[in-house]
Image (tube, rainbow, N blue to C red):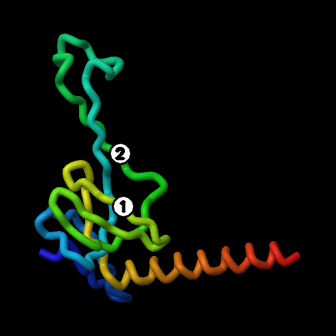
Amino acid sequence: MSGIEEIHTANASTCVASCLSAEDIRVGDYLALLTVTYEYPSFLWCGIDTMVLPPREAVFVEFRPLPYDMPLRVKSICLPFVFAKSPTGNHQVIDVRQHRLAKVDSEFAADVWKAEKSSRKDKRQRKKKRKKH
């Protein structure tokens, strides 16, 4: 399964990203982080009755990444870890046990990457102009 659905309407077609299992990730894929799960020991979690959870049991809390991340390009895989690059040139290692991922349409990702690179180039040019004045 590619992880991408294409929906056709009267005016255009729209791609919809869907969740991706770790085994379906390939080098060169564009991924988006849908959620990040954090694990806390229950004895640190305020508001939970200690009778409900034993002190050594984990509490899992799921968040959406903020600010919303741009598509990442997969550079290398060694499950459960994925090494990926963002359009800003930053690299990160993603632990697929902690993240829910979606495969992003390559045309969409290319548009985002192109816009981000153009934006970074414009910022550098404005900074150079300010230094000259």
Identify the residue at the far right of this view.
Answer: 133
Name above or below for residue 7 compared with residue 84: below
Mark 2: few, some, or many residues within 10 Å (few <14, many ≥20)?
A: few
Q: Which label lies toward us, 1 or 2?
A: 1
Is tag 1's residue or tag 2's residue first in the polypeptide sequence? 2
Residue 16 seen by the camera: no
Residue at the image point whose x is 17% and y is 24% from the top: 57
Q: In this view, does 70 lie above or below 40?
A: below
Residue 78: % across, % down: 17, 63
In terms of depth relative to the viewer, which is nearer, 43 or 35? 43
Residue 63 at x, y = what percent? 35, 45
Callout 1–callout 2 Cβ contact below 8 Å: no
Q: Is mark 1 on a helix, strand or loop?
A: strand
Indicate the amino acid at tag 2.
Phe
Q: Which quarter of the rendered picture does the C terminus lie within?
A: bottom right
Give the number of marks. Answer: 2
Residue on which the image places disc 1: 92
What is the CA distance from the residue labelled 1 to the residue labelled 2? 18 Å
Near mark 1 (Cα within 10 A), the count class, few <14, some 14-19 or many ≥20, is some
Callout 2 secondary element: strand
At label 1, which amino acid type do we have? Gln
Q: Position of residue 125 (x, y in %)?
A: 70, 80
Q: Residue 39 carries which label?
A: none
Quadrant of image for the N terminus: bottom left
Residue plotted at (40% across, 83% down): 110
Q: Mark 2 points at which residue?
A: 63
- Residue 110: in sight, yes or no? yes
